[in-house]
Amino acid sequence: MKRDITEPKTLQIYDTLTRQLAGVRSTDGDSIRIYCCGPTVYRDAHVGNLRTFLLGDLVKRTLEFSGYKVKIVQNITDVGHMSDDFEEDKMLSQSKLEKRDPFAIARDYEDKFHADLAALNILPADEYPRASECIDLMIKHIQKLIAMDYAYVGDDHSVYFSAARFESYGELSGNRLDALKPGHRYEYSEGGAKRFHADWALWKAAGNRSEMIWPTPWGNGFPGWHIECSAMSLHYLNGHIDLHIGGIDLRFPHHENERAQSNPLVSEGDRNVEAVSLWLHGEHLLFEGRKMSKSAGNVVLVRDVIQRGIDPLSVRFCFLENRYRSQMDLSWASINAAFSTLQRWRERYQQWRVLGATETPLAKELVEAILQDFCNDLDTPRAMLKLRAVEKDVALKDEERAYIFAAVDELFGLKLLELPEKELTKELKDLLEQRVLARSAKDFGKSDELRDLLLEKGIEVRDTSAGQSWKWIKF
Ligand code: AMP
Ligand code: ZN
């Protein structure tokens, strides 16, 4: 449902740079231009990554619901992202491990990424540029930085950004250049070619590397991860980013460096102009109290949720119950609880809508209040409380409940109006029929046994005055 807007609501978000709430606005008077840092496609995205990817979707839904036009660009990093623990491109180390071409791996995980987004009903971005297909943009960007004396070519034929040349370096993350200790490894090693310890590579000379390298005026090589996002965001969003989104770990050095690389290109002389109006960072997700990691064995994928017979939108449900700016602990217990509420709401909605959906002042007021929660720095937990209250509030008629659910469904993105569909197998049909027969023969022992069996197979049966009814609890 699109709102009839006479007075558009403005989404307020917490801006990392100014450390205060600020309204998300369009600077070109047309659309709100958003850039979301995308996945590095060398492995499956875990549910933590998806919590961050959900942020762009929530912003988009809120703004569009309020009547704004939105354009989102999300990059696909398929080259240049170096591993934290050893200095190798994540794509190339995965390629060695799988003994497959790195680009083939990248395309496979890119497909999986899109499937995961769809499973969580995360709206697709308008464009997904791949880093490996934007090398020319990066080279041009680097050439401009060299010409403006923000970057230099090292003896090793890599190109470095002069951190000290960008006066407000550190403002985004709160790091001060003079406090960053020499010896701290910011990026991959540079063989002594850097002039200052906090400088970083915009372009890295190929050295012994033979795959994923490109020719440049400085020799063969490959891009640094940070320059990818500067070049792609400015190009695909036409020179300005109204809102930049990513996980909290990207604040430093990724976004700090991106800001230093992007601002000189949009600034007038030495007067600093911000290429990005607002920076939005989402906090991390823990699973059952711990950071998700392979070694802890607690990395959860969307696939794992589906394999347990749980609608993956239950994970979205859990995310919505927590504010994006707080660290959140997800667990199987909370996912299961969310699933059962989601199923109940879908079922209830089907009952409420029997007499139609009626718009009343009270129902409209509730819809507005829910939108207001989203506009208030994505206060989704409060909005979820309101949705829970709609189910219980005795002051509301069913038709009003139906109206509210239908009105806000696209804001929450929980597919509340649908019942999950699954064909009944012959075996299940037979079991349901046998139970009806057992009850009419007053064989309650057998009918209870059959109820338990059906429950195990994902079907909950109930006895109503109109006879036996059933619903899926798994699909
Ligand atoms: P990557 O594919 O590793 O580049 O990560 C993609 C996105 O997921 C980035 O924006 C990260 O900040 C974010 N991210 C990584 N780990 C987590 C986590 N545990 N919880 C939430 N976001 C995360
Ligand atoms: Zn990025």
Image (tube, rainbow, N blue to C red):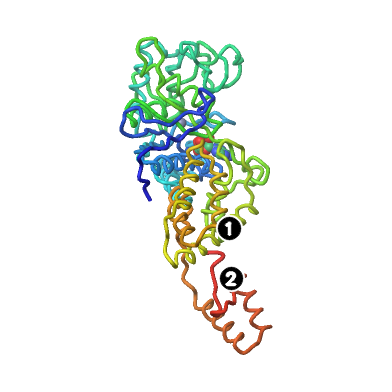
Mark pair 1, 2: CA separation: 22 Å
Q: Tell me the crowding category of disc 1: few under 14, some 14 to 19, or many 20 or more residues within 10 angstroms, Cα based.
A: few
Of 77 and 104, nearer the camera is 77
Q: Which mark is residue 307?
A: none
Percent position (x, y) of residue 46? 54, 45
Percent position (x, y) of residue 466? 53, 79
* SS label for mark 1: helix
User: CB at mark 1 closer than 8 A to ligand 1?
Assistant: no
Residue on which the image places disc 1: 392
Mark closer to the chain start, 1 or 2: 1
Q: Is residue 100 visible?
A: yes
What residue sits 52% from the left and 32% below the top?
281
Percent position (x, y) of residue 163? 49, 14
Q: Tell me the crowding category of disc 2: few under 14, some 14 to 19, or many 20 or more residues within 10 angstroms, Cα based.
A: some
Question: Which kind of residue does numbered mark 2 sit on?
Answer: Glu
Of 460 and 68, nearer the camera is 68
User: Would residue 229 appear left or right of 440 to someone viewing this image?
Assistant: left
In this rendering, the count of numbered labels is 2
For marks 1 and 2, give the one nearer the viewer.
1
What residue sits 60% from the left and 41% below the top?
285
Q: Which mark is residue 460?
A: 2
What residue sits 47% from the left and 43% below the top?
371
What residue sits 49% from the left and 66% below the top?
351
Asked if labels 2 and 1 touch by Cβ distance under 8 angstroms, the answer is no
The image shows residue 348, relative to residue 99, as above or below, that is below
The image shows residue 264, relative to residue 422, as above or below, that is above
Question: Which kind of residue does numbered mark 1 sit on?
Answer: Lys
Percent position (x, y) of residue 74? 41, 37
* SS label for mark 2: strand
Q: Is residue 136 visible?
A: no
Of 195 and 104, nearer the camera is 195
User: CB at mark 2 closer than 8 A to ligand 1?
Assistant: no
